[in-house]
Image: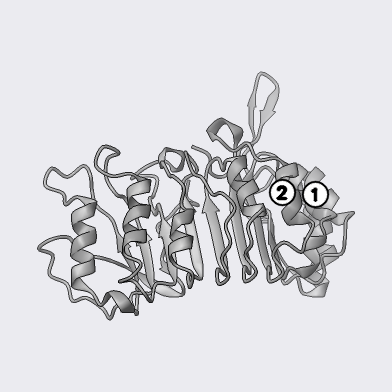
């Protein structure tokens, strides 16, 4: 779970924790940081998220705020993801400079990634047509029906199980400016039921003409995804490809070696894998002389039970 950490920046801005009541800290300029808003639901006297949100809007130059990171928002009976979405939507006439939002910035100590309950997050995109970056952590109850947005450049989903419905919604969206797409697909046990067929509209190319980075990560079907990517037209337009964090084996890497040329990439990220050294050396030899950075670090640990070998994604529960 070391791969799940608090965001350090958003929109290239350093994250700044909005102070708790009574905490004496000078506030930075509104547009100089990514404002991280989070409460501690386990403290008896902890501030409720709604109260923090109102205090935040009353303490900063709302029009100057460029990025917001939402962390722990409290127990479900106090606040849920739909309330967070509603608060963001209701503030659209005040947060006129908002360009980046991330919902669910929780570490393992706060909540396992698959315990983070989300909702339909697309109203945020509808409310902020100038938004450039949007991200979500947690796949439980997450919904992302197809959306049209003209300015969004970065879209990312971090999940131990990303619903196939979400993947299909993304693949059917109209996002002409999208340059960076990152999806942690996860495992079926935690709701990650997306298939290669769900990815097909994305892999055929043309859906996102500006796309330069594609991450299809943290999947228990990583070999199948690698085989599909090996023949996917979208790869020709990419500069970086990320198939890390999953259960990639020699089979998937061999499919990449036998597919279309990848020498135009600047980076191929395969870290956290189950690839043997001879096959790892083959792909390095095929790509590194052309200047492609190939990351095959962090080999995964095999677990054997009654003669059955088990491989696990980097992030699940």
Asked whether residue 150 is in view, the answer is yes
User: x, y percentage for residue 238?
Assistant: 73, 68
Residue 193, compared with residue 153, is above or below; it is above
Q: Nearer the viewer, mark 2 or mark 1?
A: 2
The secondary element bearing badge 1 is classed as: helix
The quarter holding residue 80 reads top left
Q: Which residue is pictured at 18% across the width and 64% down the height?
A: 55
Please tell me which residue is depicted at 20% across the width and 58% down the height of the picture: 52
Q: Nearer the viewer, residue 186 or 54?
A: 54
Expressed as whole percent of the image width and height from the top left, the position of residue 228 reads 80, 49
Could you say which disc has been placed on residue 228 in the image?
Answer: 1
| Residue at the image point whose x is 33% and y is 74% from the top | 65
Q: Tell me which residue sits at (82%, 65%) in the image.
A: 262
Neighbourhood count class around disc 1 (C-alpha, 10 Å): few under 14, some 14–19, many 20 upward: many
The residue at the far right in this view is 258
x and y, in percent, of residue 215 in the image: 64, 57
Given residues 290 and 265, the one toward you in this image is 265
| Residue position for label 2 | 199
Q: Kindly give the residue lying farthest to the top in the view shown.
A: 306
Q: Are marks 2 and 1 in contact (CB under 8 Å)?
A: yes
* Dot placed on the residue nearer the N-terminal end, 2 or 1: 2
- Sort mark 2 into few (<14), some (14-19) or many (20+) by Cα contacts within 10 Å: many
């Amino acid at each position: 779970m070391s791969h799940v950490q608090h965001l350090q920046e958003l929109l290239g801005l350093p994250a700044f924790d909005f102070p708790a009541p009574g905490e004496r800290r000078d506030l930075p300029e509104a547009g100089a940081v990514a404002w991280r808003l989070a409460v501690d639901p386990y403290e008896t006297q902890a501030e409720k998220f709604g109260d923090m949100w109102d205090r935040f809007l009353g303490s900063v130059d709302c029009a100057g705020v460029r990025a917001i990171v939402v962390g722990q928002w409290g127990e479900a009976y106090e606040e849920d993801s739909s309330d967070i979405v509603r608060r963001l939507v209701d503030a659209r006439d005040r947060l006129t400079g908002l360009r980046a939002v991330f919902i669910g910035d929780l570490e393992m100590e706060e909540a396992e990634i698959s315990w983070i309950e989300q909702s339909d997050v697309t109203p945020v995109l509808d409310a902020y047509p100038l938004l450039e970056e949007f991200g979500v952590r947690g796949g439980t109850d997450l919904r992302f029906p197809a959306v049209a947005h003209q300015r969004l450049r970065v879209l990312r989903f971090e999940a131990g199980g990303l619903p196939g419905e979400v993947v299909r919604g993304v693949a059917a969206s109209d996002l002409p400016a999208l340059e960076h797409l990152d999806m942690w697909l996860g495992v079926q046990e935690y709701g990650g039921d997306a298939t290669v067929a769900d990815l097909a509209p994305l892999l055929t190319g043309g859906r996102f003409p500006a796309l330069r980075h594609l991450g299809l990560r943290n999947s228990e079907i990583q070999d199948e995804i690698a085989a599909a990517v090996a023949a996917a037209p979208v790869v020709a337009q990419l500069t970086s490809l990320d198939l890390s964090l999953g259960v990639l084996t020699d089979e998937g890497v061999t499919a990449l070696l036998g597919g279309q040329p990848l020498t135009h990439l600047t980076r191929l990220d395969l870290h956290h894998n189950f690839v043997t050294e001879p096959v790892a050396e083959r792909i390095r030899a095929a790509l590194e002389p052309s200047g492609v950075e190939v990351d095959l670090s962090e080999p995964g640990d095999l677990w054997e039970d009654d003669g059955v070998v088990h491989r696990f994604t980097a992030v699940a529960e």
